[in-house]
Amino acid sequence: MYMLLSYKSSCPKHSRKEYVKYAKVFPLSTTLDFKVPSKWYRRVVGSLEIICGLAMAIIPNYKVKNLSNAVLLFLMLMAVYSHYMVNDRFERIAPALVFFFMLTGRLVIDWQLRREDAQPVAANGLDDKTRKQD
Protein backbone atom coordinates (compact mmCIF):
# COMPACT_ATOMS: atom_id res chain seq x y z
CA MET A 1 0.00 0.00 0.00
CA TYR A 2 3.03 2.23 0.31
CA MET A 3 3.35 3.19 -3.33
CA LEU A 4 -0.34 4.00 -3.55
CA LEU A 5 -0.31 6.15 -0.42
CA SER A 6 3.04 7.87 -0.68
CA TYR A 7 2.54 9.76 -3.90
CA LYS A 8 0.32 12.71 -4.57
CA SER A 9 -3.05 11.08 -5.01
CA SER A 10 -4.53 14.24 -6.51
CA CYS A 11 -2.07 14.13 -9.40
CA PRO A 12 -1.99 10.75 -11.16
CA LYS A 13 0.34 12.09 -13.85
CA HIS A 14 2.99 12.75 -11.20
CA SER A 15 2.81 9.09 -10.15
CA ARG A 16 3.08 7.95 -13.75
CA LYS A 17 6.20 10.04 -14.31
CA GLU A 18 7.79 8.62 -11.18
CA TYR A 19 7.16 5.05 -12.31
CA VAL A 20 8.86 5.78 -15.62
CA LYS A 21 12.03 6.54 -13.64
CA TYR A 22 11.59 3.48 -11.42
CA ALA A 23 11.03 1.16 -14.38
CA LYS A 24 14.33 2.30 -15.87
CA VAL A 25 16.26 1.22 -12.76
CA PHE A 26 14.44 -2.10 -12.33
CA PRO A 27 17.00 -4.70 -11.15
CA LEU A 28 18.24 -7.20 -13.74
CA SER A 29 16.69 -5.28 -16.62
CA THR A 30 20.11 -4.31 -17.97
CA THR A 31 21.65 -7.69 -17.23
CA LEU A 32 18.88 -9.67 -18.88
CA ASP A 33 18.43 -7.01 -21.56
CA PHE A 34 14.70 -6.36 -21.25
CA LYS A 35 12.68 -3.23 -20.60
CA VAL A 36 9.88 -3.13 -18.07
CA PRO A 37 6.94 -1.02 -19.28
CA SER A 38 6.26 1.57 -16.58
CA LYS A 39 2.50 1.22 -17.04
CA TRP A 40 2.57 -2.49 -16.19
CA TYR A 41 5.16 -2.02 -13.46
CA ARG A 42 2.84 0.49 -11.77
CA ARG A 43 -0.22 -1.74 -12.21
CA VAL A 44 1.48 -4.90 -10.95
CA VAL A 45 3.02 -3.21 -7.90
CA GLY A 46 -0.25 -1.47 -7.01
CA SER A 47 -2.30 -4.63 -7.48
CA LEU A 48 0.10 -6.71 -5.38
CA GLU A 49 0.01 -4.12 -2.61
CA ILE A 50 -3.79 -4.07 -2.55
CA ILE A 51 -4.15 -7.86 -2.73
CA CYS A 52 -1.54 -8.53 -0.04
CA GLY A 53 -2.89 -5.77 2.20
CA LEU A 54 -6.42 -7.16 1.98
CA ALA A 55 -5.15 -10.70 2.57
CA MET A 56 -3.33 -9.60 5.72
CA ALA A 57 -6.41 -7.76 6.97
CA ILE A 58 -9.14 -10.25 6.09
CA ILE A 59 -7.84 -13.81 5.77
CA PRO A 60 -7.28 -15.46 9.19
CA ASN A 61 -4.81 -18.12 7.99
CA TYR A 62 -1.33 -17.32 9.33
CA LYS A 63 0.39 -18.87 6.30
CA VAL A 64 -1.46 -16.52 3.96
CA LYS A 65 -0.67 -13.58 6.25
CA ASN A 66 3.02 -14.46 6.34
CA LEU A 67 3.17 -14.94 2.57
CA SER A 68 1.47 -11.58 2.05
CA ASN A 69 3.87 -10.04 4.55
CA ALA A 70 6.86 -11.47 2.68
CA VAL A 71 5.57 -10.15 -0.66
CA LEU A 72 5.05 -6.69 0.83
CA LEU A 73 8.52 -6.82 2.39
CA PHE A 74 9.97 -7.56 -1.03
CA LEU A 75 7.99 -4.70 -2.57
CA MET A 76 9.27 -2.32 0.11
CA LEU A 77 12.84 -3.40 -0.58
CA MET A 78 12.25 -2.74 -4.26
CA ALA A 79 10.77 0.68 -3.42
CA VAL A 80 13.80 1.63 -1.31
CA TYR A 81 16.12 0.41 -4.05
CA SER A 82 14.23 2.34 -6.74
CA HIS A 83 14.22 5.55 -4.72
CA TYR A 84 17.91 5.20 -4.02
CA MET A 85 18.81 4.52 -7.65
CA VAL A 86 16.97 7.61 -8.95
CA ASN A 87 18.59 9.75 -6.24
CA ASP A 88 15.37 10.69 -4.47
CA ARG A 89 15.57 12.72 -1.28
CA PHE A 90 15.38 10.90 2.05
CA GLU A 91 11.84 12.24 2.55
CA ARG A 92 10.80 10.10 -0.41
CA ILE A 93 12.62 7.01 0.86
CA ALA A 94 11.49 7.29 4.50
CA PRO A 95 7.91 5.96 4.08
CA ALA A 96 9.19 2.82 2.37
CA LEU A 97 11.67 2.29 5.21
CA VAL A 98 8.95 2.77 7.83
CA PHE A 99 6.67 0.23 6.14
CA PHE A 100 9.63 -2.14 5.74
CA PHE A 101 10.43 -2.01 9.46
CA MET A 102 6.77 -2.37 10.44
CA LEU A 103 6.36 -5.43 8.23
CA THR A 104 9.61 -6.90 9.55
CA GLY A 105 8.45 -6.35 13.13
CA ARG A 106 5.11 -8.03 12.41
CA LEU A 107 6.84 -11.03 10.89
CA VAL A 108 9.32 -11.38 13.77
CA ILE A 109 6.58 -11.11 16.39
CA ASP A 110 4.49 -13.72 14.57
CA TRP A 111 7.46 -16.11 14.41
CA GLN A 112 8.16 -15.60 18.12
CA LEU A 113 4.55 -16.29 19.07
CA ARG A 114 4.46 -19.43 16.90
CA ARG A 115 7.71 -20.69 18.46
CA GLU A 116 6.36 -20.01 21.95
CA ASP A 117 3.14 -21.91 21.17
CA ALA A 118 5.13 -24.86 19.80
CA GLN A 119 7.10 -25.39 23.02
CA PRO A 120 5.86 -28.37 25.01
CA VAL A 121 4.18 -27.80 28.37
CA ALA A 122 4.27 -30.39 31.15
CA ALA A 123 1.09 -32.02 32.45
CA ASN A 124 1.00 -29.83 35.56
CA GLY A 125 1.21 -26.67 33.45
CA LEU A 126 4.87 -25.98 34.16
CA ASP A 127 7.48 -26.22 31.50
CA ASP A 128 11.11 -27.28 31.99
CA LYS A 129 12.35 -23.71 32.33
CA THR A 130 9.98 -22.96 35.23
CA ARG A 131 10.91 -26.22 37.02
CA LYS A 132 14.62 -25.40 36.84
CA GLN A 133 13.99 -22.01 38.42
CA ASP A 134 12.11 -23.52 41.40
Image (cartoon, rainbow, N blue to C red):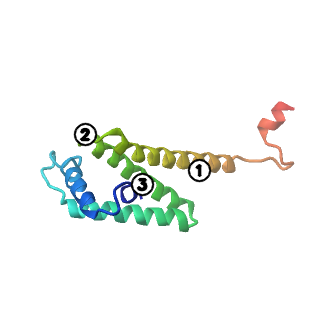
In terms of image quadrants, where is residue 5?
Answer: bottom left
* Count of all numbered marks drawn on residues in the image: 3
**Which quadrant, please, contains the C terminus?**
top right
| Disc 3 and disc 2 in contact, CB within 8 angstroms | no
Q: Where is residue 89 in the image (x, y as percent from the top left)?
A: 31, 40
In the image, 19: left or right of 58? left
Amino acid on which disc 3 is placed: Leu
Give the structural element (helix, strand or loop) at label 3.
helix
- Residues 93 and 61: in front is 93
How many other residues sit within 10 Å of disc 3, few (<14), some (14-19) or many (≥20)? many
Residue where numbered disc 1 is placed: 110
Marking on residue 87: 2
Q: Which of marks 3 and 2 is in front?
A: 2
Q: Where is residue 103 in the image (x, y as percent from the top left)?
A: 49, 49
Report the Cα–Cα distance between label 3 and label 2. 22 Å
Q: Where is residue 94 in the image (x, y as percent from the top left)?
A: 40, 43
First in sequence, mark 3 or 1: give its number.
Answer: 3
In the image, 66: left or right of 34? right
Report the Cα–Cα distance between label 2 and label 1. 34 Å
User: Does residue 60 sit above or below 21 in this rendering?
Assistant: below
Residue drawn at x 29%, y 62% as measured from the top left = 11
Amino acid on which disc 1 is placed: Asp
Give the structural element (helix, strand or loop) at label 2.
loop
Amino acid on which disc 2 is placed: Asn
**Which quadrant, please, contains the N terminus?**
bottom left
In the image, 115: left or right of 36? right
Give the structural element (helix, strand or loop) at label 1.
helix
